Image: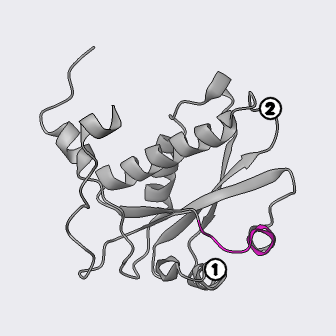
Amino acid sequence: TPAAPAGALDLLAGRMSCRSFTSGRISREDLNAMLRDALEAPSSCNQQAWHFVVLDQPEDLARAADLAGGNLHFRDCAALVYLCFQKGWTHDNFSVVQGVAAAAYHLMLSAHLRGWASVWNAGTGDPAKVREMLGLPLIFENQGAIAIGRAAPDSPARKPPRRALQDVV
């Protein structure tokens, strides 16, 4: 297996959550490239049970922000990707949820490596109202949303410290 290119691992470690975006747009081509990268994530038994609902129109982003309450950055991000999965077989240990989480992180890394900022949001608002807004059938569950956009100039430029390895391992 070839080693990672010089600096690649530092680049990955530099990814930060951003909650302050400019109100710029993202091309469908760029967004689709990031979503294709998300599909390369691992999933239990290769189920690939993830589904994404994308909002990128200002009026839809404003509605999402209103539903989410404290997530005002939904209004200014370029795109909001809702992370959904189809309910069903999960090995009784959340394997479908874990697969969606892996795809979500692939999406965030793809955005970062392409020069976009992002943040994962577990709180998207009242589940019934979000389901209605997204038109989700009852067999689907929303797990959260990833806001993607260009970091605003006032966005924090420093990543919060990480826990020490010896405290985790």
For mark 1, does the 10 Å Cα neighbourhood hold few (<14), some (14 to 19), or many (20 or more) residues?
Answer: some
Left or right, 98 with reference to 25: right
Q: Point out the tag, 2 or 1, that comes first from the N-terminus.
A: 1
Question: Which contiguous range is marked in magenta?
Answer: 123-131
Please name the residue that numbered disc 2 is placed on. 89
Disc 1 marks a residue whose amino acid type is Asp
Residue 30 drawn at (x, y percent): 43, 57
Residue 92 drawn at (x, y percent): 75, 31
- Residue contact between numbered discs 2 and 1, judged by CB atoms under 8 Å: no
Residue sitting nearer the eye, 104 or 33: 104
Numbered disc total = 2
Residue 162 drawn at (x, y percent): 27, 51
Residue 33 visible in rendering: no
Residue sitting nearer the eye, 151 or 99: 99
Colour treatment of the image: one colour
For mark 2, does the 10 Å Cα neighbourhood hold few (<14), some (14 to 19), or many (20 or more) residues?
Answer: few
**Could you tell me which quadrant the N terminus lies in?**
top left
